[in-house]
Amino acid sequence: MLLALCAPVRGLKLQPGSHPQPGSHPQPGSKLQTCRHQQPTSPLAARVDSFNSCVLRTLPDIIELARKHRVSGLLYTALAAIPEVTDACARTPAFRSLEKDRHAGLVFRNFSFSELARITTHLDARGISVLPVKGLSLSMQLYGNPLTREFRDLDMLCRVDDLLVLISPMEELGYVCVHFDKDLERKDPGMQLSVLHHLIMEHPVMKLSVELHKGLFKEGIDIRAPALPELFSRHCLLNWNGITWQTLDPADQAAYMLYHGAGHAWSLLHWLLDTAVLLSGNTPLDLVSVAGRIREYGLETTLAAALGICSRFFDFDIPSAFSQAATARSFRSIRPYRFVQRYLPAGTVPAGNFLYLCRLNFGFFPALEPNPHPVRSVLSRFLRHWRVQSRIAHIPGPLFPFFVVFKIAGFFGKPLYRRIAACRRSSRA
């Protein structure tokens, strides 16, 4: 129901039904077909059904779900667009809390603009070049208005070799270093700080987090990412209400957004709607340039799977720029759609070490790949993860096979060691 309410605000129309059959995709450039076992539902009928008495009874739950999926602003816009619904909901405490959320979100986004200008000016004065990514910049490039998309922090790509040099300038602005990269810190607490992918700084008073990255992608991921000098050389300028800032080229921004959504398995409507808007062509971006940049990054499989997922959720014409992706096996496979559909209601995907290993290999989870060989897929991910660990530990390449043997022996020997230690403790007692 939440998806049915928010999709029209983004200019998207839901596919009739929610369980399309495999192989029901159209040819590029044609309308998506209705599944044979389902009756088509007009968008008007779908919206009318959404605004019945059940909505009023479950409105608090819907609002809470919208907050989790970061679409509370879209939900308010959808409800406020229907006078009958506004009259029925306006008197409820839940709807008033939604109004407060919208107002607080607008205040936060406007404040983020001023803070963005303050941070970039301060870092530029110290010779540190930065490019804001995602957040404000993505909203401006994808929708033409930076206030229409929710975000929680500021992400900046920094042209530095060591992220530690950024701590002092940020502390001068009142920020404190909250923690380093969570994933690497959890996997290897004794790692060298020079291999960090990003730092997270937070202002203790304003509660604004700033993530400072030294690369778009982490080590060990099969992405042909351009070097930082190239990314900075083809930057673009954005302007909003007199504030001008540099950011990624729109095509780079879109390609990174596609990868980022896949890395989270599109488990939030926030990411799913962004991807659907891009792939449907309902955006001011140049799709030909976007498709070319996606090929440059080596994200063709990601694009095909994302197109297959979005075209099963939404009804749109497939842009000609993505026609080649619409012929790939990942586009035709039902498995990526089933995976996203399974975890979208919860707004999260299973977490754990294995999930982390999969993300190291690609911006995908195993279920998003079309019919992978299970043994080869698992071995590939473990080997790639161990390769990253060996680099962090500065182990020479020729010794990597011994490192793998050591890891396998440790994996199987740890339970035995624990049992021996437990027996020794019991015997001493």
Image: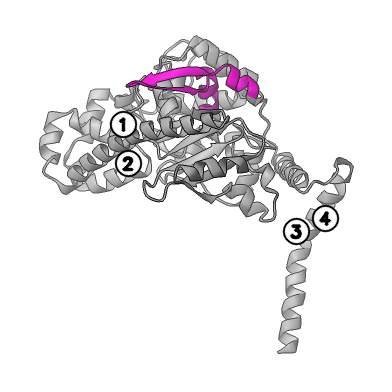
Mark 1: few, some, or many residues within 10 Å (few <14, many ≥20)?
A: many
Residue range corresponding to the magenta coloring? 229-258
Q: Nearer the viewer, residue 244 or 53?
A: 244
Mark 3: few, some, or many residues within 10 Å (few <14, many ≥20)?
A: few
- Residue 55: quadrant of the picture: top left
Task: Give above or below for 28 relative to 147.
Answer: above
Mark 4: few, some, or many residues within 10 Å (few <14, many ≥20)?
A: few
Q: CA distance from mark 3 to mark 1?
A: 46 Å
Q: Name the residue carrying label 2.
A: 66
Q: Quadrant of the C terminus?
A: bottom right
Which numbered disc covers residue 406? 4
Q: Position of residue 91 (x, y in %)?
A: 11, 43
Q: Position of residue 309 (x, y in %)?
A: 48, 29
Sequence-wise, the earlier of marks 3 and 1 is 1
Sequence-wise, the earlier of marks 3 and 2 is 2
Q: Name the residue carrying label 1.
A: 6
Of helix, strand and loop, which one carries label 4?
helix
Instruction: Specify the amino acid type for callout 2.
Output: Ala
Q: Residue at (61%, 30%) from the top-left corner?
A: 159
Sequence-wise, the earlier of marks 1 and 2 is 1
Sequence-wise, the earlier of marks 4 and 3 is 4
Q: Quadrant of the N terminus?
A: top left
Q: Name the residue carrying label 3.
A: 411
Q: CA distance from mark 1 to mark 2?
A: 9 Å
- Residue 406: quadrant of the picture: bottom right
Q: CA distance from mark 2 to mark 4?
A: 47 Å
Viewer-nearest of discs 4 and 3: 4
